[in-house]
Amino acid sequence: MTTQLTRREFLRLASIAAGAATLAACAPAIQPTAAPAATTAPAAAGAAELKGTLRVSAQSWIIKKWPVEDVAKKFEAAHPGVTVEVSPAPSKGEGETYLVQWSQGRTNVDVALGGSKSDVAAYVGKDLLVEFGPGFFTGDFARDKFINAFLSDGVYAGNKQFAVPLLGEVMYTTVRKDWYKEAGLLDANGKPIPPKDWNEWKEYAKKLTVPDKRNGLDISWGTNFMWQQYITGLALTKGSPFEKEGSTAPDFSSPEAEALLQFWQDIVKDGYTPTGTFTDQNAGRNDFKAGLVASLVTAHSRWPEAAQVVGEDKVTAMPILSQGRTLAYSHLVYIPKVSPVSDLAKAFIKEQIFSGYGQQWSANNFGKLPTLARNYTGLTAPEYQDILKAAAGAIHEPGYRDQAQLNKALQVELEKCINGSQTPKETLANLRKTASKLDLSLV
Amino acid sequence: MISIVSSATETSMSIKPARPHKAIRKKRLSRQRRMEELSAYAFLLPALLLILAFMIYPMGDSFYLSFTKYNFVYDKAPHFVGLQTYLAVLQDGPFLTALKNTAYFAAVFFPFLIILSLGVALLLNLPLRGITFVRTSVFLPVIVSLALTGVIFQGMILSGRFGLLNHILGNVLGLKSWTHNWLGDTRTAMPAIIAISLWKYIGFEALIFLAGLQAIPETLYDAAKIDGADSWQQLIHVTLPNLRESFALVGIWGIIQSVKVFEQPFIMTQGGPANSTLTLYYYTWINAFDFFKMGAASASAYLIAFLIMIFSLLNMYLTRSERV
């Protein structure tokens, strides 16, 4: 016997079904944290007690240049009760997914890999991250076991550690040894001689430039590096990126700042340096690998990357200037407060992120610096020791509340200056004016 | 009610039972109509709920935000400041730069879009051999995603060092002095973006014009020929007046594309060099997702919507006045 629905019943059912479907469609796409059924023991406890599902996200370039998937498997093998899921994270510029998610008390990630000090500052500002307290830094992971230059990047206002370093970078110069030799810029041991100041760099760039064939010097001036280039330039010549001693305001007025901008303007005007990185962040490294530039000022890890393409005997690294401090910075690891498995996440960081395997693999293949001193054993390239020495004396990136606005203003004004449409003096005056309207207190 | 009852009484004795039946049918009909209306609303309900949740509510919320000062990261809640947000946005240097750049983009892109797509449509309307293949080729850029278009043009075609355009200019045509860092120069970055946008959108506009052209009755042309009109006169006096509807449609679509340009500078230039390709949409995006200034971002979004509305009304008025 069949039961027929009346029209009224059909309409009622249809309305309920439609309403339910709509409500389901309105539900968040990313499910809340309840899924991983987390039962974990503190990191300090016995390894066998760890259980649960750990969701690790990493920016796509990190998945390629750091063995995230390998260490996930190692962690699972060491702890049979644990499952690790690795997924790509949104990169900078793809919208602040985490900020929205974590603010609403939801997360689809327990450990996030990737982001500079200023990128992570937004999460710190909104109080969304787990603090790595003194209990974390004990035994083999005591603070003095780390390369301080990288560890301190995760320290924010109030001297609180909200992130730890995955890998480190130092602002350096990647050079073509064969062309430096032709130009007589190698010492008796075959090492490139770093220039003493900007004027000598101009001479270097002139000697190394072959018109219509290659440029002597390329500087990464893309949106991802302009701020770093500027404060590195200041640190090299005056030891600090700040206005004056005791201040944390950026320097837009010193003679050193003006000299730096004059140097940048001159090398472009004279045809020694291209400006392709203004709109293509990868233009400098691509040009270097294609043999179109002799020197590239950027993160030190471009050196092994280029050596793989150009040849190890032809490429090396040298300090930007023979004296002065450079900039060291880290790509950070952090745990959202809304993660239900923060202890498991900390255990994963200690066992795998800080492991010799992962850190040395990344250094050997992509030149990314280990963040623990003990992981430098086995890195044989002589450049590492010099870079490590530079990192030890390096400055760190200050993270301002309005950092993003400062970066944008800096990009616009410096591009105008480098292109020659305004003088260094005018550029600095414009930057001072913009800075006066921003909140430049440290995060 | 009375009439229905009396009709029913009459029906039982009358030979012609038409009236009472009509009344009952009318009652049934009105019930049926009500049920049909209800079922129409039931079917509309999911769409209405979605529109409410994903369009009306966000629009209302962002309209409120546009009158507030609210940094999503550092402020606990939006702080109502009235029109101050709008005034601050209108006085912001980068907003004025973005407005100027968007006006420049629109002023060049819009007329070229209309003229070139009409030209292409006229060409595609000719009874030539292999025209179907040409039509497909012209439409092809429309189905390529704008993000991919940006990546291809930035990395493979317009790149200063490795680009195909510079290779053709310098190595094939021997015009070395013409080679250029197209996207890296403040003078050529925006024209390059306009050219890419035209390549991307002409196919779609041409298709609308083509549909309009094919709807014009052949008899009008026959009559014009009998009256001695040459090809040019046929175009001016027959084709163009009969494309009014297409012009209205293409016009509104073109205005929207002109004002809401975003993906091209986002992917190819990040608004640079030196803000020379910063557009209104990009300005809004930067305020919302780089600076987290939701009040300013909402205000500038409403200013853009206001601009689009003004130009669309103007377009509607112009096409309407021609019709009268």
Image (cartoon, helix red, strand yellow):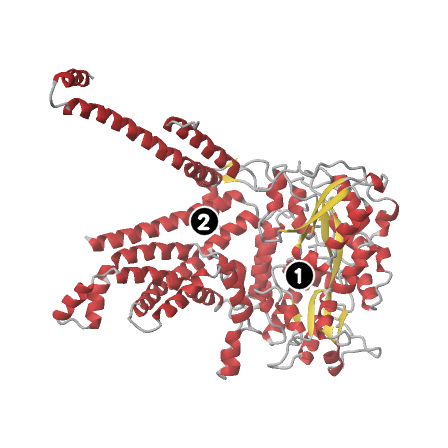
Residue contact at pointers 1 and 2, CB within 8 angstroms:
no
Q: Is residue A126 left or right of residue A182?
A: left
Q: Identify residue for label 2.
A: B90
Q: Identify residue for label 1.
A: A230
Q: Is residue A330 left or right of residue B33?
A: right
**Residue B133 placement (x, y as % from top left):** 38, 69
B34 up-or-down from B238: above or below: above
Identify which residue, B250 or B37, lies in the foreground: B37
Task: Tell me the residue at 29%/58% (across/down).
Answer: B247
Q: Tell which subunit mark 2 falls on.
A: B
Task: Tell me the residue at 53%/66% (across/down).
Answer: B152
Task: Tell me the residue at 57%/49% (across/down).
Answer: A95
Identify which residue, A340 or A189, lies in the foreground: A340
- Quadrant that contains the N terminus of chain B: top left
Residue B100 occupies which quadrant of the picture?
Answer: bottom left
Three-letter code for the amino acid on which mark 2 is drawn: Leu
A314 up-or-down from B64: above or below: below
**Residue B92 placement (x, y as % from top left):** 49, 51
**Residue B109 placement (x, y as % from top left):** 39, 63
Three-letter code for the amino acid on which mark 1 is drawn: Tyr
The reply to whether residue B95 is in sight is no
Q: Is residue A268 left or right of residue A207?
A: left
Discs 1 and 2 carry the same chain letter? no
**Residue A422 placement (x, y as % from top left):** 55, 66
Identify which residue, B208 or A179, lies in the foreground: B208
Q: Residue furthest front?
A: A1
